[in-house]
Image (tube, grey):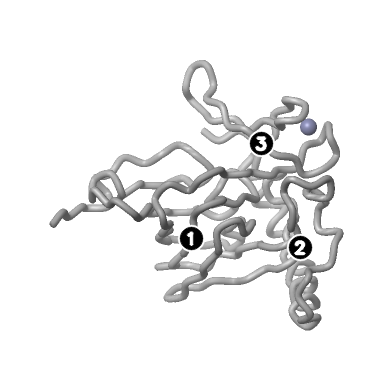
Amino acid sequence: MRKVRTHDVESYMGPASVKRPLAGELGTESLAINYFELEPGESFAFGYHSHADQEEVFYVVEGTAVFETGAIENPAGDDGAKAGGDAPTGDDTTAGDTAASDRAAANGGETADDGEAAGDGEAANGADIGVERVTVGAGEAVRFAPGEYQQGRNESGERVVALALGAPKDAGETDIRRECVSCSEFTSQEIDMTDNRDALVTRCVACDTETGRFG
Ligand SMILES: [Zn+2]
């Protein structure tokens, strides 16, 4: 038996102001578990991403998170990075309409203002790529399959507290997509630490342009 007090675990630097990895302290063998706190405008992840081998569940404890998913069917293919252009393969057109209207609402002043306030890479990170949006409130959970692309954000004005559970613990290959202004599309990204170790930087794999900075 091992017990951990969440707030005793050091937070990682990244797109969320608080990300405490609990797996190490708990000694979990097959489960990754991270405690998150997202201020308005922040994200769980560095970009729209998938884990090849790991399913993920997000349980929202407090506040409301919005997840985007879908759009990228074949990450290795030429069409992989097309941003929201292709229709989802599902036949539920109602869901598509809902997603479109939700997105229009979210693109009102609040999201843009949050992007400005957050500065750095958050504006680019807030660009839409997924075709389906799902709102997950306190007491609700959402699950993503291995290989499924997703990104969760706090688009509200209140803090989000959530737990992220991933199994198996080793996520396998992770592909992160962000909008690259040089390539004019969503491209695969790598993450580097700055030389003075005060921030993490996302860079386009294709052209090395910096697409975001998280300190
Ligand atoms: Zn690029």
Q: Quadrant of residue 162?
A: bottom left
- Identified by mark 2, the residue type is Gly
The residue wearing badge 3 is: 189
Quarter of the picture for ligand 1? top right
User: Residues under labels 3 and 2: Cα distance?
Assistant: 28 Å
Q: Judging from the image, what secondary structure is the residue with disc 3 in? A: strand
Circle 1 — which element? Answer: strand
| Residue 21, position as x, y percentages in the image | 35, 46
x then y, percent, for residue 202: 63, 33
Ligand 1 lies under 8 Å from the Cβ of mark 3: no
- Reading the chain from its start, which is encountered first: label 1 or label 2? 1
Q: Earlier in the sequence, mark 3 or mark 2?
A: 2
Q: Quick one: which residue is furthest to the left in this view?
A: 1
The residues bearing labels 1 and 3 have C-alpha atoms spaced at a distance of 20 Å
Residue at figure coordinates x 23%, y 51% from the top left: 26
Residue 56 - label: 1
Mark 1 CB in 8 Å range of ligand 1?
Answer: no
Mark 2 Cβ inside 8 Å of ligand 1: no
Disc 3 crowd, CA 10 A, few/some/many (<14, 14-19, 20+): many
Badge number at residue 26? none
Q: Residue furthest top?
A: 195
Where 198 falls versus 90 (above or below)?
Answer: above
The answer for how far apart the CA atoms under marks 1 and 2 are is: 29 Å
Element at badge 2?
A: loop
Residue 108 - label: 2
Which residue is at the front of the view, 63 or 13?
13
In the image, is residue 58 above or below residue 120? below
